[in-house]
Image (tube, coloured by chain):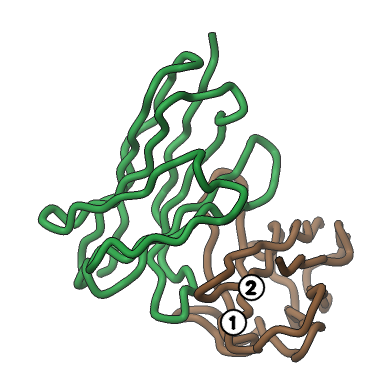
Chain colours: A green, B brown
């Protein structure tokens, strides 16, 4: 069974750094893309970008380029999304999703809630 | 960048009725790269339709997708109580991942 398990909720202050994780199981982690999606409170879905753990090929949505960093550690089947300096506007639920070669997000993690507040 | 527009914003229907949700792209896109997702409150999105018309694993046949070019439709033939949710279309692919703003299907 394909599963994506994300790290737990985080509460951070503006300016702090953060790295959240997404662990894949039940499939070959290096053979599928992992996408990241933001959902701000009460709002819709926003595509942040996608990474191929097999070779770390990463494509960022223009809106998120330079704002976050995506990475993956294939030895532990885990993808990461990180911020170097959080802002209050980063408060949101973040989802990871496994995507096939067409980049269609088929399987989703449960989400990680990030709250940034002073 | 391709922009997706969904209509209506909200659809108020009763169980047993038919729902037709529209997704329009700002420019022509390949049907192979159009998906539909369902999201219920407090839950992660779920893939319903990929490639504009193919049902994902485990999705009931009351859900169907159609369309091509710039106009796509998700149809729910007979609404069940569990179908009341928000529905998003997405254009995915090597250079895109844009979601539409969503259509909320209300009882």
Among the two numbered marks 2 and 1 on one chain, the one whose residue lies closer to the N terminus: 1
Position of A67 with respect to A100 (left or right) is right
Q: Residue at x 81, y 83 (%)?
A: B71
Do the residues bearing badges 2 and 1 touch, measured as CB atoms within 8 Å?
Answer: yes
Q: In the rendered structure, the residue with mark 1 lies on which chain? A: B
Tell me which corner region of the image, top left, top right, bottom left or bottom right, holds residue B106.
Answer: bottom right
- Per the image, the residue denoted by label 2 is B91
In the rendered image, the vertical position of residue A102 relative to residue B54, given as above or below: above
Query: Element at badge 1?
Result: helix
- Per the image, the residue denoted by label 1 is B33
In the rendered image, the vertical position of residue A24 relative to residue B23, given as above or below: above
| Percent x, y of residue A75 | 10, 56
Tell me which corner region of the image, top left, top right, bottom left or bottom right, holds residue B5.
Answer: bottom right
Outermost residue toward the top in this view: A118
Query: Element at badge 2?
Result: strand
| Percent x, y of residue B35 | 61, 76
Q: Residue at x 39, y 53 (%)?
A: A109
């Amino acid at each position: 069974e394909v599963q994506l398990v994300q790290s737990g909720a985080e509460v951070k202050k503006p300016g702090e750094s953060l790295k959240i994780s997404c662990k894949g199981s039940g499939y070959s982690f290096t053979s599928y893309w992992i996408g990241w999606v933001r959902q701000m409170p009460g709002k819709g879905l926003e595509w942040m970008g996608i990474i191929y753990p097999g070779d770390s090929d990463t494509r960022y949505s223009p809106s998120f380029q330079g704002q976050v960093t995506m990475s993956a550690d294939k030895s532990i089947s885990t993808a990461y999304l990180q911020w170097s300096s959080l802002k209050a506007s980063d408060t949101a639920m973040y989802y990871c999703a496994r995507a096939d070669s067409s980049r269609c997000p088929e399987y989703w993690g449960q989400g990680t809630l990030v709250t940034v507040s002073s | 960048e391709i922009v997706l527009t969904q209509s209506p914003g909200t659809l108020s229907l009763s169980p047993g009725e038919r729902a037709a949700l529209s997704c329009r792209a700002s420019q022509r896109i390949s049907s192979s790269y159009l998906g539909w997702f369902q999201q219920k409150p407090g839950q992660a999105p779920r893939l319903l339709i990929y490639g504009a018309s193919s049902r994902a694993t485990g999705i009931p046949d009351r859900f169907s997708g159609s369309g091509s070019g710039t106009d796509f439709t998700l149809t729910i033939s007979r609404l069940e109580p569990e179908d009341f949710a928000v529905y998003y279309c997405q254009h995915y692919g090597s250079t895109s991942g844009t979601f539409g703003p969503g259509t909320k299907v209300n009882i």
